[in-house]
Image: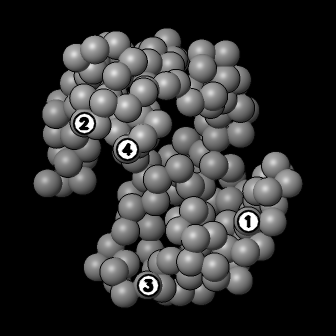
Amino acid sequence: MLRAAVKSGTPLGLEAKAYMERGALVPDEVIIGLVRERLQAPDCHRGYILDGFPRTVAQAEALEKTLGDLRLNLDHVLCLDVPSEDLVARIAGRRTCRTCGAMSHVRFSPTKRQGVCDVCGGETYQRDDDGEDTVRKRLAVYAEQTAPLVRFYQGRGLLRRIVGTGDVAEIFARLVQSLGG
């Protein structure tokens, strides 16, 4: 959502871009404004999924107010429970093609030739934010800032916990089942 707003040059997107270019975090009020704009788009009228937002209780409270202003409800909050070491292995193993952007994983979906994209033959690399040390730092930030959202949404009766281990099909089936599908 953030990248799309920046790319399309919306006023909020340009404001966010200025923060991003300075290497600063985009303030909550800008993010909430972007979410508000996006939720009002026609393709959201039948439903939507927010992924990676909110990240803090303050953002969750601002989202509640925004949804109230728009006369929208939050039906469910899904929490994928995955052990930290599994997350480190998943994220640190990701590789991206420099040429076409295709994703692979050294363990779960390796390329036929190490370091070479199966799609276009370009070089694959590990993004800086996917390095093991960075992932561990991100998990520490998650524990401090985002984990409190579990209690926040549990207290509102919206939280649905899903076991996030196993293969993709198993996890997806659990997600669908938790939504009543």
- Between marks 1 and 4, how big is the CA–CA gap? 24 Å
- Between marks 2 and 3, how big is the CA–CA gap? 34 Å
136 displayed left or right of 159: right
Mark 1 or mark 4, whichever is nearer to me = 4
Tell me the crowding category of disc 2: few under 14, some 14 to 19, or many 20 or more residues within 10 angstroms, Cα based: few
Residue at numbered disc 2:
119
- Between marks 4 and 3, how big is the CA–CA gap? 29 Å
Label of residue 17 in the image: 1
Q: Which of 132 and 97 is in front in this view?
A: 97
Which residue occupies 63% across, 70% down? 6
Residue at numbered disc 4:
100
The answer to which quarter of the image holds residue 8 is bottom right
Secondary structure, mark 4, is loop
Which residue occupies 59% across, 86% down? 69
Q: Residue 172, how many percent across, how many down?
A: 22, 40
Q: Which of marks 2 and 3 is nearer the N terminus?
A: 3
Mark 1 or mark 3, whichever is nearer to me = 1
Q: Quadrant of the C terminus?
A: bottom left
**Do labels 2 and 1 touch, CB within 8 Å?**
no
Which three-letter amino acid code belongs to the residue tagged 3? Ala
Q: Which of 175 and 3 is in front in this view?
A: 3
Q: Can residue 66 be seen in this view?
A: no
Q: In this view, does 61 lie above or below 144?
A: below
Which three-letter amino acid code belongs to the residue tagged 2? Val
- Between marks 2 and 1, how big is the CA–CA gap? 31 Å
Residue at numbered disc 3:
41
Mark 2 or mark 3, whichever is nearer to me = 2
